[in-house]
Image: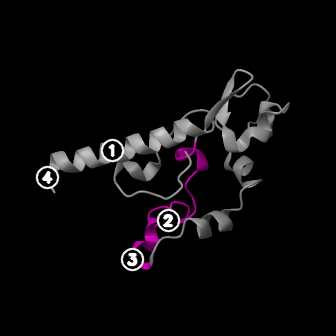
Amino acid sequence: MSYKKLMFAVLLVFIACTVQAQETLKQFDGIKGRSYHADFYDGKSCDSCHDSKKPLNLPADDACLSCHDLDDLIKATERAKDEMGQNPHNNMHFGKDVPCMECHGEHQPREHMCQGCHSFKYKKFKQ
């Protein structure tokens, strides 16, 4: 595959992921957030995920893992045997140690970390 074709394919994957992520963003009383986290915007404050009521930093992984079980995520994102090391939640480069916010963004789309070097897709990827 030529370099131009490869770069075009990478661009298409990036656009597809960004469009999918944009579709899950909704406005909740002036704050943009993910539709699948709508419960957090129903009268709850930012400190449900952030360390303070006025968030200045990204949430710690503990905030995500208080609701999402890492072993369940690993199982849900398992890849075929020849792609086993490509599991985004347990991969050949970083194991289980990639911070959640490296790939997932609650208030804006994020490109998953692997996209910088790889062009494969993850089914049902939620940024």
Give the residue number, with chain letter if any, for mark 1. Answer: 12
- Residue 101, given in percent of the width and then of the height, sits at 58, 44
What's the residue at 56%, 48% (across, down)? 126
Q: Are marks 1 and 3 in contact (CB under 8 Å)?
A: no
- Residue 93, given in percent of the width and then of the height, sits at 44, 63
As measured in the structure, the alpha-carbon distance from the residue carrying label 2 to the one carrying label 4 is: 27 Å
Overall secondary structure of the magenta section: loop
- Looking at the rendered structure, the secondary structure element under dot 2 is loop
Q: Are marks 1 and 2 in contact (CB under 8 Å)?
A: no
Chain-order first, disc 2 or disc 3? 3
- Looking at the rendered structure, the secondary structure element under dot 4 is loop
Pair 2/4: label in front = 4
Chain-order first, disc 3 or disc 4? 4
Give the residue number, with chain letter if any, for mark 4. Answer: 2
Give the residue type at disc 1: Leu
Give the residue number, with chain letter if any, for mark 3. Answer: 82
